Amino acid sequence: MPAAKSPKKPNTSKEELLKYYREMLLIRRFEEKAGQLYGMGLIGGFCHLYIGQEAVVVGLEAAASEGDKRVTSYRDHGHMLACGMDPKGVMAELTGREGGYSKGKGGSMHMFSTEKHFYGGHGIVGAQVPIGAGLAFADRYLETGGVTFTYFGDGAANQGQVYETYNMAELWDLPVVFVIENNQYAMGTSVQRSTKSPSLWERGAAYGIEGEEVDGMDVLAVKAAGEKAVKHCRAGKGPYILEMKTYRYRGHSMSDPAKYRTREEVQKIREERDAIEHVRELLLQGKHAGEDELKAIDKETKDIVNAAAEFARESPEPSLDELWTEIYA
Amino acid sequence: MATEILMPALSPTMEEGTLAKWLVKEGDEVKSGDILAEIETDKATMEFEAVDEGTVGKILIDEGTEGVKVNTPIAVMVEEGERAEDIDTSASKDSAPADDTSDKDTDTAKPMSAQPAAAMPEPEPVEDPEVPEGTEMKTQTVREALRDAMAEEMRGDDTVFLMGEEVAEYQGAYKVSQGLLDEFGAKRVIDTPITEHGFTGVATGAAMGGLRPIVEFMTWNFAMQAIDQIINTAAKTRYMSGGQMSVPVVFRGANGAAARVGAQHSQDYAAWYAQIPGLHVAMPYSAADAKGLLKTAIRGDTPVVFLENELLYGQSFEVPDLDDYTVPFGKARIWQKGDDVTLVSFGIGMKYALEAAEKLAEDGISAEVIDLRTLRPMDTKTVIESVKKTNRCVTVEEGWPVSSIGGTISSVLMQQAFDYLDAPVITCTGKDVPMPYAANLEKHALVTTDEVIEAVKTVTYK
Ligand SMILES: Cc1ncc(C[n+]2csc(CCOP(=O)(O)OP(=O)(O)O)c2C)c(N)n1
Ligand SMILES: [Mg+2]
């Protein structure tokens, strides 16, 4: 089945489109700034940028309700911004400062917000998948009606614990949406070089889990698929799988020379499938917004990101006592 | 407004690099995403992209320049209406702070690989029984030595093969397997999906089936996904089968903390695996030992856990230029003879031990420095003999303090050299906390040279 595309004349509103535009742009500008700060040595270690994949989290957050949970891998900055976490706190965690979400102790890959029901930020490929099912287990047990969005990559989709989780999630009708962010590469390994499965979502069928493939570069298609999945989960029908066809524009992390694909391949997707450009065109063509209005949004977004970077540079390093705190309850 | 383009940090460990090539020239217009230059780090050549749009006003660092410090201005971008000439002065003015930062290390022009070696304290040469007198030495990084060990053993034995994530086409996540795919082909250098538990089991089965697999874990942190196969199958099968079957597999990869990669990626497994009967465990420090021990590991019939270190990969050492240099397991190397205290370490811990020994020498304290090299079997005999002479011992390791390698050595000394000890053994270890990300906290979480010096002063009552 080809990826579901949004209809030619999408059933959406100006407000909705502007909201997606803003949210996706915020992620992109934030990530570009993070890349810059990394280059300057203000961010250390691993730093995995989300540029190119913005429509996935923005579309799915639009399908989520208050109280729903989310959990993902180390490529987590976009997820945090999309669920409403403060760009300042996220950026300050990237620089390892007191003002960061984990007071500088977690870093880019390990951030959490109980307030926004964001359960991390996990550095071990695939490990967040059973965690997501466990969160859903708690929701079912406590009858909260909540749904958990469990994000993982195409590479992670080959880990054994994913399939152990599928089995239990379906067996116990857990309200979890498994979101495979298929950006076509796991570090330098393309999907074609890591599996002969024709599609990743269809593997769920072996466990009785329904799912579908979605154009992850089209925020409206993502949102529509997300609503369907959430409805399925909330109706008590168990888990649902969404395989988002998306693409990462930057290297795997900051130190990836990216020799495994051509610049032309990246350029072509940027030019033809870019999620932000897509919404921009819908706005302009539908005469929902003029260039000036969009320019103003660009400027506001840059200001937010610059303020976050400023905060992240100014915030002090954690006090040395922090080394010994928060190890035990 | 003119903006400076600064030399970027392109990996967690990069401090300087070579500006290999400019792909733009002065006057070119660039937009976000265009490649500006190619920059060589210690690991790879990276493309460096523009973040903003603008015009290349001036190139400040010529291509081919080596040892360009991170954050040095390398070019100036101008916006519409500005001219490069207008920004000349501001650029040279702005570059001053970057120069200031480089005075920590005045030797800017030196190529990267040469630097760590020069920073290493020169050990008093101690005879190596594995190296015949008059053997030529060549300078190699630990990374190259490991690659050569695998290549030599693969040339000599068709059943040896390498598998792991990104080992083939990507040439290794840390470039240890560079060139192996070219030489040995895809049958013997195999990229796996990200399925540690699965491929560890497959390798273990292949070893039972008559092959000699080398499994590369991208880092040992990820081998926790696979630890069941390592311990419950690989380590125990020979015993459980009454000696019918061996499992000749080598599990290798980067172990311990790198730099700023946080709690889930910074863990030392030395003490974990050293506890397991049925395994051999090596944790080399120098390139020569990395090479000699890995060759021994591949040839042996016992499953081996081979713990490398990302921060050591790029360091250079002298390696004997022999056709077949092997190092036996269970024999420590005495790096430096001394009389006042015995410093026992292994792997990256040796860096702290040797630095401390050098500084202690300035204070007139003579330390004997022992590199265990393998933790199972462990050469406690050499340690005991040394302590009989020095009567004091300090151990150094990066791992956690509880049930540590140092703890084991200290109990061995108490049981077998009690009468020779003039002070309690002090174990210097990493702090008893998960690894924090923040730069200042990380420094404190690791064992430090100062702590080793402090410990030596305590046991020598100085
Ligand atoms: C268990 C484990 N194995 C290996 C790694 C190293 N690693 C980090 S990310 C990655 C690739 C994952 O690719 P994918 O799941 O497609 O996610 P993406 O990075 O594309 O978002 C690998 C191999 C890890 N962190 N954890
Ligand atoms: Mg991927």
Image (cartoon, coloured by chain):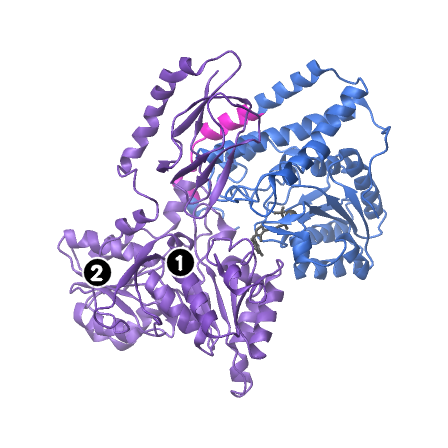
Chain colours: A blue, B purple
- Direction from residue A206 to residue B426 in the image, left or right: left
Is there any visible trace of residue B203 in the rendered image? yes
**Number of marks drawn:** 2
- Name the residue carrying label 2: B459
Direction from residue A101 to residue B63 in the image, left or right: left
Q: The C terminus of chain B lies in which quarter of the figure?
A: bottom left
Magenta: main secondary structure: helix
Q: Chain of mark 2?
A: B
Residue B279 is situated, as x and y percent measured from the top left of the image, at: 46, 74
Q: Amino acid at mark 1?
A: Glu
Q: Position of residue A8 (x, y in %)?
A: 86, 30
Mark 1 closeness class: few <14, some 14–19, many ≥20 residues within 10 Å: many
Image height check: is B211 above or below B163? below
Q: Position of residue B396 (x, y in %)?
A: 32, 59
Q: Is residue A327 visible?
A: no
Q: Residues within 10 Å of mark 2 (few under 14, many from 20)?
A: many
The stretch of residues the image draws in magenta is A305-322
Q: Which picture quadrant has residue B417? A: bottom left
Q: Which mark is residue B144?
A: 1
Which of these two is toward me, B416 or B296? B296
Rendering coords of residue A76 (x, y %): 61, 41
> On the rendered structure, is A23 left or right of B453?
right
Q: Quadrant of residue B325?
A: bottom left
- In primary-sequence order, the first of circles 1 and 2 is 1
Residue type beneath disc 2: Val
Q: Quadrant of residue A304?
A: top right
User: Disc 1 sits on a residue from what chain?
Assistant: B
Kind of element beneath mark 2: helix
Instruction: Name the one closer to the observer, B351 or B394.
Output: B351
